Image: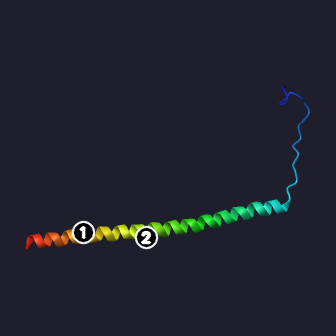
Amino acid sequence: MCPLFPNPVLIQVHLSYVPPVLYLCHYSVLFLGMAYRDKRYKEERRMAAEEREKKDEKKWNEGELAEAQDDSMLK
């Protein structure tokens, strides 16, 4: 049977100790990023809704104007 490694000595993986403060910092930054993105997403949705509302109002006004002109031409 052929060994997996050229040298039969097993390679040990040294797990280094990570201080809990680093975990706290990592997850704190992750949470703050999610909160910031949520705030930005809500703002983008609000702005898109305002633009859509203005666009619909403009379209409705153009329709009303065209309808009024058609009525005046028929009379």
Q: Residue 70: x and y, percent? A: 15, 69
To which quarter of the image does residue 6 belong?
top right
Pick whichever, 23 or 39, lies toward us: 39
Judging by the rendered image, the residue that carries numbered circle 1 is 63
Residue 4 lies, in percent from the top left, at 83, 30
Q: Nearer the viewer, residue 25 or 5?
A: 25
Instruction: Give the residue at x 88% y 37%.
Output: 11
In this rendering, position of residue 18 left or right of residue 72: right
Q: Amino acid at mark 2?
A: Glu
Which residue of the protein is positioned furthest toward the left in this rendering? Answer: 75
Residue 41 located left or right of residue 50: right
Residue at 55% in and 65% down? 41
Amino acid at dot 1: Gly
Where is residue 54 drawn, in percent x and y?
Answer: 37, 70
| Earlier residue among tags 1 and 2 | 2
In the picture, residue 36 is in which quadrant? bottom right
Q: Residue furthest top?
A: 1
Q: Answer above or below: position of 12 versus 3.
A: below
Split into 4 quadrants, where in the image is the N terminus?
top right
Within-10-Å neighbours for mark 1: few <14, some 14–19, many 20+: few
Residue at 29% in and 70% down = 60
Query: What secondary structure is found at the residue carrying circle 2?
Result: helix
What numbered label is drawn on residue 50? Answer: 2
Q: Is residue 7 above or below residue 57?
A: above
